[in-house]
Image (tube, rainbow, N blue to C red):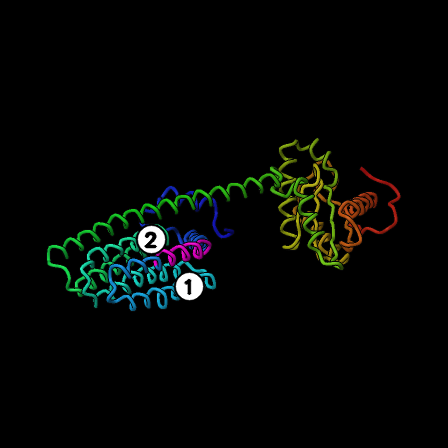
Amino acid sequence: MGVVTLDQVEGQIARGFRYLHFSPEIEELFRKDYAAERVRLAAIWGVIGIFIYDLVYFGDHTMLPDVFTGLFTVRFLVFTPFVIACILAVRRWPDARLYDVLAVAIAVLGVTLPMAVATQSASPYLFVYQNGNSAAFLFFVIALRPRFFAVLSGLALMCASHFTTTHLTGAFDDVTYSGIITFYLTLSIFLAVSAYFLEQKDRQNFLNQLRGSLLCQQLERNAERDELTGLLNRRSLARIGGMLWNEAPGETAVSAILLDIDHFKRFNDVHGHIEGDACIRAVSQCIRAAVDEAAFVFRFGGEEILVLAPGREPLQALAMAERIRSAIEGLRIPHRGLTDGCVTASLGTASAIAADTTLERLLQKADDALYEAKRMGRNTVVLATDAEPDAQVA
């Protein structure tokens, strides 16, 4: 689902899918969902189909006693093992195209086998007997439910097989034979139309479910994003922090970099809040560009930004923090409230083995280092130590 966007799904809904096909990305997801759903039901319908198909054994004995042995063979020794093999195959290789091919094969074989044996019978009940194949047509479309174009292929092959075998029996005059053809063609047309609308409904439901899922994901992302900067917000910190601590191996280091824009209150007083917001956005974008791909960037407070970097040792975190500091200074954002007239930032960084600390203690160490950076004159980076800072600077 990660490769499909909400805009793509809504565009597909607007365009429709008259020919029962989506754009390539959405079609791939649909095929996977279709295969998973059909495989989930394959064993159930397989057992039901085998039971009904083999139950006709009693009809074989009554209506076609002269070829009963052959019918027993094709039902129990050919068709039943074939269906079981098909079920095992789709469970082993869950693929939409494979399912469709095997569904067609089961349907065609189910229609062909008993009628092929019946061509050798002289029973007067052949007309009644051949009517039983209508159940196979219904089971194919309603129970197995392959995709529409597989349904068309299957119905065409089933009709061809049935018309051929009934003709080969030599038991029907032209009027009766034409009636058989008319009946099965009419049945096939109705089933084909039904299959088209069934798949259209399935595809519409799939799009609606996919759209709903993407909307939920978007809402979750928006709920965890700061509206001004687009960074993660403090609400997401508990979830991501918990994820990092739960998934980190025992000796994995986690680093925190806490950043505060220097003299930001004075910047707002001199430049106004609109330019202040623009400054925070620019600094946020700069930080996102400077950190490693694995790092998480949060807006921690008004002008405070937090970076959590899993797998980073103290010196690596220190280098990343210095890269951030230098990049912010390189923006050369005017600050008319300062003599040097440039926005800078102070950063405190702390690192620890995840198993030996908590997120709260790590953040406290980074916060202490940040205030030490301010005490040292700002626009600098301090690596946390176990010693407490001499004083805290606002």
Judging depth in this view, the residue of 33 and 141 nearest the camera is 141
The residue to which callout 1 is attached is 84
x and y, in percent, of residue 168 in the image:
17, 66
Residue at position x 66%, y 31% from top? 272
Numbered badge on residue 139: 2
Compared to 153, does 243 lie above or below? above
Does the magenta segment cover residue 49?
yes
Question: In the rendered view, does 17 fall on the left or right side of 2?
Answer: left
Segment colored magenta: 39-53
Judging depth in this view, the residue of 212 and 72 nearest the camera is 72
Residue at position x 63%, y 35% from top? 275
Q: Compute the Cα span from label 1 to label 2.
A: 17 Å
Mark 2 closeness class: few <14, some 14–19, many ≥20 residues within 10 Å = some
Compared to 387, does 391 lie above or below? above
Judging depth in this view, the residue of 303 and 162 nearest the camera is 162
Q: Is residue 126 visible?
A: yes
Does the magenta segment cover residue 316?
no
Question: In the rendered view, does 76 fall on the left or right side of 325?
Answer: left
Q: Main secondary structure of the magenta part?
A: helix
Mark 1 closeness class: few <14, some 14–19, many ≥20 residues within 10 Å = some
The quarter holding residue 237 reads top right
